[in-house]
């Protein structure tokens, strides 16, 4: 792609318009700031343009849009549209309802995404002109995941495995990271997806897709692997090397507005659980079963990638890489000496990966491996607030407060938790990613049964 190069070394990465929108700012390949839009709007998994996250990143870097070398978007919408059309054609005339629901959005907005992004960016600041915008680049979805996994890792050379629902076409992809390059090796394509298989069970057990998968993982220890054989015999054909195919007769995500269908119901003892209804042993057994299937697939994929690359290290990204139980098994039972997982492994991390791909792949800039620390800085990349700023905010809101020394604060918090109070904890820069790592956390006494209640 030909574009005018600027002398600046600032790059902004953006992920948006699906779920977990985010922004990330780099300076000379160094991560300056990154944040998800949901942390500002309080809208869980906010898919909209990350207006607040972009403004925060630029503010943190003390730069403007016109100072940037590039703005890089985390996937290629035209390729995704191609997949959408080919899928509808392959299953026609089934799927007409889904087709009619999707097309207006694509024709109105997503096919003109470049113009939409420019409009949103120009609208961030009063008086800013479109002519002042830097060039806008697009990476592939799994390329963004791979870049987010390898470049911040402490490895000079590593195998990279990306597993999610679906990007443009890829649902699982393997890469080799060496120096400043990530090289694609192979991929599994839509509709065959481990992430979508897991999401099908998320949907079937009554949780929200792209949101409730962690609840399924948390439910698994309470169940039995009762349906593992049923899953392998009917839903997924798994080969010894970890590659797989799904039997689409049991799924509805290619042709309808749901994840599963009646044939899926018949395999698992009745219809899906209604959201918010009581959980039964069946849901626990389903959760345990799909969890074990997921772990087996990931283990086999890891072994294959190790055999093909002879790499000692493994990097992981994509939504399935948030499955910490599977990751633990790869570390304990897999052939790799070390693994590194992108903390923002889902689509939010795509903003980071897009920016890093722009720096290393498009600009071909060298990579300095951070072996003595953490290039993600503990994933503490979001905004922070001083005591004075917090106090001013509380005064403006007429909120009651008391200011304590650390010694007084810790004793007070311990007493409150022992009294079965729930504590909201804010400290330093906010985490980037889905895990609460002590900076934005909800604290409670795990010894108390009351703390486990909704």
Image: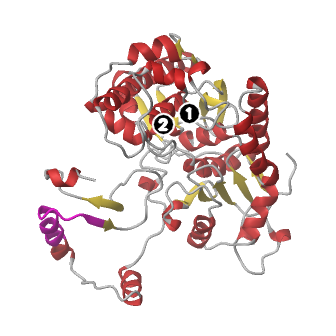
x and y percentages locating residue 186 in the rendered image: 65, 23
Q: Nearer the viewer, residue 42 or 381?
A: 42
Say whether residue 230 is left or right of residue 225. right
The reply to whether discs 2 and 1 touch (Cβ–Cβ < 8 Å) is: yes
Q: Which mark is residue 72?
A: none
Name the chief secondary structure element in magenta: helix
Give the labeled residue for mark 1: 259
Query: Percent from the top left, x then y, of residue 347?
Result: 57, 46
Mark 2 lies on a secondary structure that is: helix
In the picture, the quarter occupied by the N terminus is top right
Q: Residue at x 44, y 71 (%)?
A: 384
> For mark 2, what is the residue?
203
Q: Is residue 410 visible?
A: yes
Per the image, label 1 sits on a secondary structure element best described as loop
Residue 223 location (% of width, % of height): 28, 28
| Residue 20 horizontal/vertical position (percent) | 55, 52
Q: What segment is highlighted magenta in the picture?
A: 410-424
Identify the mark nearer the N-term, 2 or 1. 2
Vertical order, 159 against 132 (above or below): above
Q: Is residue 69 above or below residue 375?
A: below
Residue shown at the point (23%, 63%) measured from the top left:
422
The number of discs equals 2
Residue 185 position by quadrant:
top right
Q: Residues within 10 Å of mark 1 (few under 14, many from 20)?
A: many
Q: Is residue 34 visible?
A: no
């Amino acid at each position: 792609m030909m574009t005018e190069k600027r002398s600046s070394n600032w790059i902004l990465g953006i992920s948006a318009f699906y779920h977990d929108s985010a922004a990330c700012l780099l300076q000379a390949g160094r991560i300056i700031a990154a944040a998800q839009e949901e942390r500002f709007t309080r809208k869980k998994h906010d898919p909209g343009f990350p207006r607040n996250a972009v403004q925060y990143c630029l503010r943190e870097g003390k730069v403007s849009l016109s100072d940037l070398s590039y703005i890089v978007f985390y996937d290629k919408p035209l390729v995704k549209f191609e997949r959408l059309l080919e899928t509808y054609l392959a299953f026609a005339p089934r799927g007409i309802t889904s087709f009619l629901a999707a097309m207006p959005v694509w024709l109105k907005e997503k096919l003109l995404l470049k113009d939409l992004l420019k409009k949103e960016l120009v609208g961030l600041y009063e008086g800013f002109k479109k002519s002042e915008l830097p060039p806008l680049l697009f990476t592939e979805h799994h390329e963004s995941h791979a870049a987010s996994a390898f470049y911040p890792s402490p490895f000079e050379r590593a195998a990279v495995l990306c597993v999610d629902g679906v990007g443009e076409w890829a649902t699982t992809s393997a890469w080799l990271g060496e120096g400043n390059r990530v090289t694609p090796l192979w991929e599994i394509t839509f509709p065959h997806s481990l992430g979508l298989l897991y999401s099908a069970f998320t949907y079937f057990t009554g949780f929200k897709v792209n949101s409730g998968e962690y609840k399924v993982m948390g439910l698994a220890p309470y169940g039995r692997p009762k349906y593992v054989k049923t899953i392998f015999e009917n839903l997924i054909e798994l080969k010894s090397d970890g590659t797989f195919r799904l039997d689409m007769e049991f799924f509805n995500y290619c042709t309808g507005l749901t994840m599963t269908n009646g044939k899926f119901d018949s395999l698992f003892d009745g219809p899906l659980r209604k959201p918010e209804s009581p959980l039964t042993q069946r849901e626990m057994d389903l959760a345990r079963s799909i969890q074990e299937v997921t772990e087996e697939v990931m283990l086999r994929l890891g072994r294959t990638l190790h055999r093909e690359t002879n790499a000692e290290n493994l990097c992981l990204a994509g939504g399935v890489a948030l499955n910490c139980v599977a990751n633990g098994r790869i570390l304990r039972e897999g052939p790799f000496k070390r693994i590194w997982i992108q903390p923002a492994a889902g689509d939010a991390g795509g903003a980071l990966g897009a920016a890093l791909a722009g720096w290393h792949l498009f600009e071909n800039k060298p990579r300095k491996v951070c072996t003595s620390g953490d290039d993600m800085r503990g994933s503490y990349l979001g905004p922070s607030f001083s005591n004075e700023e917090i106090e001013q905010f509380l005064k403006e809101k007429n909120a009651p407060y008391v200011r304590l020394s650390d010694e007084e604060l810790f004793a007070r918090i311990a007493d409150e938790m022992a009294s079965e109070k729930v504590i909201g904890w804010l400290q330093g820069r906010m985490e980037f990613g889905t895990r609460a790592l002590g900076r934005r956390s909800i604290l409670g006494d795990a010894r108390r049964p009351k703390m486990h209640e909704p």
